[in-house]
Image (cartoon, rainbow, N blue to C red):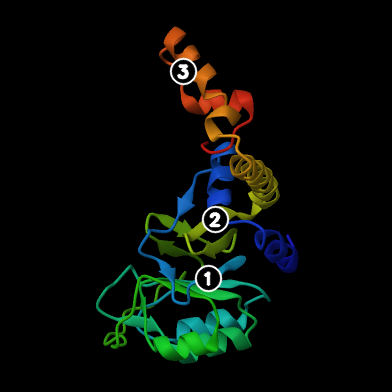
Amino acid sequence: MDPQELRRRFAALTTAHLTDACIRAQIPVRCAPSALQAVIPGSRIAGRALPARHVGSVDVFLEAFEHAELGDVLVVDNGGRADESCVGDLVALEARTAGVEGIVIWGLHRDTADVRTIGLPVFSTGSISTGPQRLDERPKDVLESAVVGDWTVSSADLVFGDDDGVIFVPSSSAAEVLDLAEAIRDTERHQAEQIRSGVSLRTQVRFDEYLAGRRENPSLTFREHLRAVGGAIEE
C-alpha cells in the first residue's frame, strides 16, 4: 500500500481499532509491550518496518537509512535493555533527513528535550542519559529483522503507533485489516452517538436478549451475541 494512503487511512483510526480488526480477521495481534510509549504524547506513526538490531554503535542505523524508503519506520532492537540508550537526537535528525516516518525502540532513548524539539515520532520504553559502553559482534542479518517484546518484525510488516502503543501488522493483510478497522470505528461511533442521545448501550446491543439466551444456553458468550446483533465493543 502506498505510504501516503497508509497514513491517510490510519489518521482516522486508532491502534485499538486495528487490534480489534486483527482479531476479527483471525490475524495474530502483535502489540508491543505496554512499556513502549511515545516520547511526545499524541505522536502517531504508520509505515513499513525498517528493522535494525543495535550492537553498540549507531552505524547500523546509518546503514539502514541507506536503503530506507520514504515513510518507513525504523524499528530498533536493543533487547529491551534498561542500562543504556541507543537512539538520541542525531539519529532522530538523520532519520527525518532520510524520509523515515518515525522510530520504535525496544529499549531506551536519550536527549529527550532535543528529540521533542525535532518532533519526529519516537516510541521507546523510556530514557537514560548514558549511551552504550559496549561493541558486540555484528550479526550478518542485523538489518533483516528486529525483536520487540515477543514479536519478530521485518520489512514485510507495517508499524502503527499512537497513544495506546504500537502494533505490527503484516503488509499482506493491510487492506483487509484497515477495511475491518474502519467498519469497527464506524459502528462504535454510531453507538457512542446513540448513548449521547439517550439510547443506552445495553439497549443497543439487546443485552436483555443476551441474558435470556444465556439462561437457555449457558455456553453462549457475549462476543457471540454481539456478532449476531452487529455490536463492536468486543471481538
Q: Check whether the beta carbons of the residues at disc 2 and disc 1 lie within 8 A of each other.
A: no
State the CA–CA distance, disc 3 to disc 2. Answer: 31 Å
Q: Residue at x 72, y 64 (%)?
A: 8
Residue found farthest to the top? 216
- Dot 2: element: helix
User: Residue 117 location, x and y as percent?
Assistant: 51, 89
Q: Position of residue 64 (x, y in %)?
A: 55, 79
Residue type for callout 2: Thr
The residues bearing labels 1 and 3 have C-alpha atoms spaced at a distance of: 39 Å
Which residue matches tag 1? 42
Which residue corresponds to the image point at 60% horizontal and 38% vertical from the top-left?
Answer: 198
Please give the residue where the numbered disc 2 appears in the rendered image.
Answer: 15
Query: Gap between marks 2 and 1, in whole Å?
Result: 13 Å
Q: Secondary structure at mark 3?
A: helix
Q: Is residue 27 left or right of residue 176?
A: left
The residue nearer to you, when weighing 227 against 208, is 208
**Residue at point 53%, 48% (across, down):** 19
* SS type, badge 1: loop
Which disc number belongs to residue 121?
A: none
Residue type at mark 3: give it. Leu
Q: Residue at label 3?
A: 211
Circle nearer the viewer, 2 or 1:
1
